[in-house]
Image: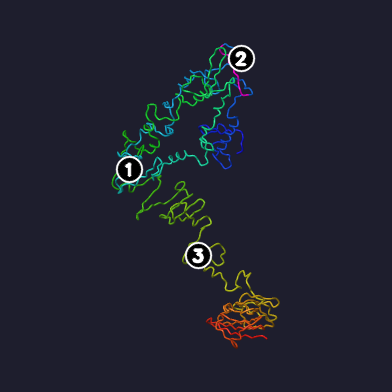
Amino acid sequence: MKPQAFQPGELRDEHDQIIRAGVYGKKTPFVSSDNNAILDYIMNNFDALYAQIPNGRAYVKSVNNITPDSNGNVTINLGSGGGGGTGTNITVDSALSSISTNPVQNKVLYAALNDKLDKTGIAAYATRDDFGNIIADTYAKKSEVSGVVKSVNNITPDSNGNVTINLGGGGGTGGTNITVDSTLSSTSTNPVQNKVIYVALSNKLDKNGTATYATCDSSGNIISNTYARKSDLSGYVKSINNVKPDSAGNVNISTSGGGSNITVDATLDSTSSNAIANKAVYAALNNKLDKTGIAAYATRDDFGNIIADTYAKKSEVSGVVKSVNNIAPDSNGNVTITVSGGGGGGSGDYLPLTGGTVTGGITATNFQTGTGAANYFQCRKFRSEGNANSYYHAIDFGYSGHDSVDFYEYDPNWNFYKCTSGTKSSAVLVGNINGNGWNGGARLTGAPTAPTAAVGTNTTQIATTEFVQAAIPTNVSSFTNDAGYIKSVNNIKPDSNGNVNISTSSGGGGGVSTSVANTWTAQQNFQRLKFNFESFATSRISGTYNSPAKSVAIYNVTGALTLDMSTLAGMISNGDTSIFTAYIASNGSYALSITNAGTLKYAGSAVDLAITASGLLLNIFLTKNASGVVTSIAQATKLS
């Protein structure tokens, strides 16, 4: 925030209504990253006030309507005492005022203070106890608790106000009581009353809430010890009649004509007999309680009884029993409940432990049947809204004459979850049924079946394998829509087996182009071949080692050469043969080695495998039998 003039804050009354708007208030965060929070406005206002106090002193504009000279001094001539002087007299007020800066008469102060409550006094009326609880909301009047039940069947409640009743008859001993705590506890595992939680949370400040009070500035300085209030500075002057104040801030003024000096105190003091500034008294009295006023807090009632020990809080009596089955307690607070024994239907409005019929509605936290093998819950309808005839969210179970379970939902939308941890937050949606049907992965195992649609069905109905088999024609000509299918090749239709023989002779069309190059990327099998011209892709290699991957190669060597035949041998299928031809040029005589060629044989002698400066023509015949065994025959011819 850039420095700016004093910025007023928002003011609210006791009902949280804004009585004066401001540039910041209750909804403004205390601190923020953009420096426009309450703390920033507080620091800006302190700076703005400090800027108005040169050298740490405050100046007044006038004293008794006399403005100060160039040095800031005011000369006051008091005309009392019959002497000379033309100044303005000091007026001592006879009544308290919120705006007057004159002193006030002692007796007026005495009367005003005598009508105020001491800090340790007893207020005639109070709205809160000494813990801050509102008495009318927290404590119950005696008239409110005079008719409550003190015991049931002469059994008094425990410390939490609970009474356990074991009802005889019906073969049971009663269920388990549920204790609902009326106060928060760090150890209890019981549920707690809604209103107790509401009160506790309502008294907490939101994370982005505005604190009502602040004790320190952003540098950690205590505000009340570090900064001066406007009311502390507004009444100070530098001097009067060129007389500066003493260490206590007082100035003695001499009146001409024999009068007495009048010292006006700026603050209340238990020993001073001087007059005091009216506004200081007004501020002090304004913070006092009238004798007939209502104190914010009190520890005792008007009889001297300690409130916290004498009265019961509403939270302590909110759960007590006022009647049982509309029977109010007797004068001692007791209610006697009579339950007929045996296994009968009870008496009056009581429901027995076995049998019996409830004709009205029942509201309960939950119903439990127990985990026994014979335990069950029987129900004809479930409704989550409305009554028995409402079908916004409903389930109707099967019963005599209605052999189905019916689900109703207004949307409609049914979700199915997998939940292994027992908490809703970890549940995983595995499927959903809405107006369009099931949405989720199918989990059908084995050989699931479905009705077979009629031939020619063209809908979103599931097609069985029987439907698909019947829909597949035995030949293309039986297709209703045969567009996109091959009916002939080079105008030659297939035979009865669906085969087409393509002849490349004249007049029979051309299955393979005879005018442009054809490239085959996979193996082609030919029964007979006739070439007018044949050429081979040739590798041209220099070095001392090579594993050829083509049928023809040219080598230019300057030393011994090793030919690894594993690549070519691996490309031959079982039962097939290949021939490798190489021309080896050299600048001298070197050794030639052939490796990974299976069983190597020679046309001639092994010594023929020698490189000379004139060159060498090498042919290797590679064959692989049905078992994958490779045999190679090498033929080497020295060139001249």
Mark closer to the observer (2, 3): 2
> Circle 2 sits in a helix, a strand or a loop, which is it?
loop
Callout 3: few (<14), some (14-19), or many (20+) C-alpha neighbours within 10 Å?
few
> Circle 1 sits in a helix, a strand or a loop, which is it?
loop
Instruction: Kindly report the distance in space between the C-alpha atoms of the residues bearing marks 2 and 3.
Output: 122 Å
Task: Answer left or right for 421 relative to 623.
Answer: left
Q: Is residue 74 magenta?
A: yes
Task: Answer left or right for 344 relative to 20.
Answer: left
Main SS of the magenta segment?
A: loop
The residue singled out by tag 1 in the image is 164
Q: Earlier in the sequence, mark 2 or mark 1?
A: 2
The x, y position of residue 165, in whole percent, is 32, 43
- Which amino acid type is marked by label 3? Pro
Q: Residue furthest left?
A: 342
Determine which of the numbered discs, if any, sits on residue 86 in the image: 2
Give the camera-side residue of 33 and 349.
Answer: 33
The x, y position of residue 19, in whole percent, is 55, 31
The residue singled out by tag 3 in the image is 451
Picture quadrant of residue 516: bottom right
Is mark 2 in CB contact (under 8 Å) with mark 1? Answer: no
Is mark 2 in CB contact (under 8 Å) with mark 3? Answer: no
Instruction: Kindly report the distance in space between the C-alpha atoms of the residues bearing marks 3 and 1.
Output: 62 Å
Q: Residue furthest right?
A: 515
Callout 1: few (<14), some (14-19), or many (20+) C-alpha neighbours within 10 Å?
some
Quadrant showing the N terminus = top right
Mark closer to the observer (3, 1): 1
Callout 2: few (<14), some (14-19), or many (20+) C-alpha neighbours within 10 Å?
few
Q: Earlier in the sequence, mark 3 or mark 1?
A: 1
Give the camera-side residue of 515 and 42.
Answer: 42
Residues in magenta, as a range:
71-81
